[in-house]
Amino acid sequence: MIGSMRRLLCALFSLAVWAQAPDLVGLYLTWNGDPATTMTVNWVDLHTATSLDVHYRRIGEAEWKIATGSKFGIADTTMQGRRVQLTGLTPDSNYEFNLGARIAKAGEGWRFRTMPKDLNRPVHFVAGGDMMHTRARVDKMNAVAGSLDPDFALLGGDLAYANGVSSGRWADWLKSWLTHSVSPDGRLLPMVLAMGNHEVKGGYKGKIPQDAPFFYSLFQTPSGKSYYAQDFGKYLSILVLDSDHTEPIAGPQAAWLESALAARKEQKFVFVVYHWPAYGTNKPPKGSDLPIDAPRSVEIRKEWMPHWEKYGVTAVFENDHHTYKRTYRLRQHKRDDENGILYLGDGAWAVSTRPVPKNAWWLAHTESRNHIFSVRLRAEGTASVKAVDIEGQVFDKIEIAKPRTAPVSSAPPSGQ
Ligand SMILES: [Fe+2]
């Protein structure tokens, strides 16, 4: 009941602010720098001469500051993108902002919160992928995400299902996010994004940027690539990978993963996220009953998995198969209850779900159920993960007792 009221209030608030700027196609927050002191504001409309200014101030301060952004084109559409990185922000603080000339009207506009510099309070994020088959259903789950009041959202690909061509689906996805993924106190949620096959013409082995023109124009990642690291002080790093959509799994990306993990030995929590799963729940290849026999899953286990097994991570988020899954703790392609890695997936934010296998040796819990993960990181190095369904009900809980699996000095090739 309380959750429903919160969602209703949230939706009313969102509609109120939406009414201020009806020409907006989208307004969304990302990071290209330190999430404690920067925020990248991106917005999209259909007007070529719209102001590039963002007015912003820390809530409680009297003076507005102005930052002027730059334009970007969005694929070959008439949509006009604008982007500005706000810098010099105060960590763990609430800000209000507004676009262009709307500024002087205090009380209008939108809000965001910077991340803490240190883990001096629990940090909370939601994670999931495979989002929008229908607008109504993604609206509903986006509202659940907002109602959970997270610091940010980690999105694992297959966002708008636009397949690299549909501007209308991107417009719908952006509108849904702005309208519904809003915290109870009216904050927009920053996004950390991975690419999925439905961002790409043909799904896999795409060329950059022409086969994924919307992803590469809408989202400016810290590296400019579809694989990158997002660091949060010394307490959290998220390694985002591209599972063969526009970057090969082997080669430079695998080498980068190894170096990124080596450079983050001291980070307290480390998560990995990508779209196609190494430990899937559906889509077995011809000649097999096991989704983990899919060639792309085998390649991920061969090229990527030894690196995170060697350095230790908190958990790995996977997507694409439209189910809920939590694996047993796994290492070297078998159960290792002491020092194995959790794989959480499998991408069912708001898409139609698929059947799940029975008695798969790697799966501790699986269901055909829409869900998002609600992840809370605590200063003492423990974490809780809750699976929340589209009605806002928690249906699975995981307690993580240590921040990362123990590093293993030399991990032999594994995964077959
Ligand atoms: Fe997918």
Image (cartoon, rainbow, N blue to C red):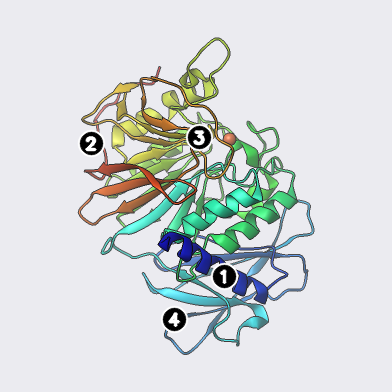
From this viewpoint, is residue 227 visible? yes
Q: x, y (%) of residue 331?
A: 30, 26
Query: Which kind of residue does numbered mark 1 sit on?
Result: Leu
Query: Which residue is drawn at the image coordinates 47% and 44% (left, top)?
Result: 371
The answer for how far apart the CA atoms under marks 3 and 4 are is: 43 Å
Measure the alpha-carbon separation of dots 1 and 4.
21 Å
Q: Can you tell which of label 1 and label 2 is closer to the viewer?
A: 1
- Point out the residue furthest to the top here: 287
Q: Secondary structure at mark 1?
A: helix
Please give the name of the residue rendered at 70% of the width and 37% of the height, measured from the top-left corner.
Answer: 201
Q: Nearer the viewer, mark 3 or mark 4?
A: 4
Tell me: is circle 3 under 8 Å from ligand 1.
Answer: no
Residue 12 — which label?
1
Amino acid under label 4? Ile
- Where 249 sits versus 403, above or below? above
* Dot 1 or dot 2, earlier in sequence: 1
Query: Is tag 3's residue or tag 1's residue first in the polypeptide sequence?
Result: 1
User: For residue 252, which numbered disc appears in the image?
Assistant: 3
Q: CA distance from mark 3 to mark 1?
A: 47 Å
Location of the C terminus (image quadrant): top left
- Above or below for 9 versus 270: below
Q: Which residue is mark 2?
A: 406
- Disc number placed over residue 401 in the picture, else none: none
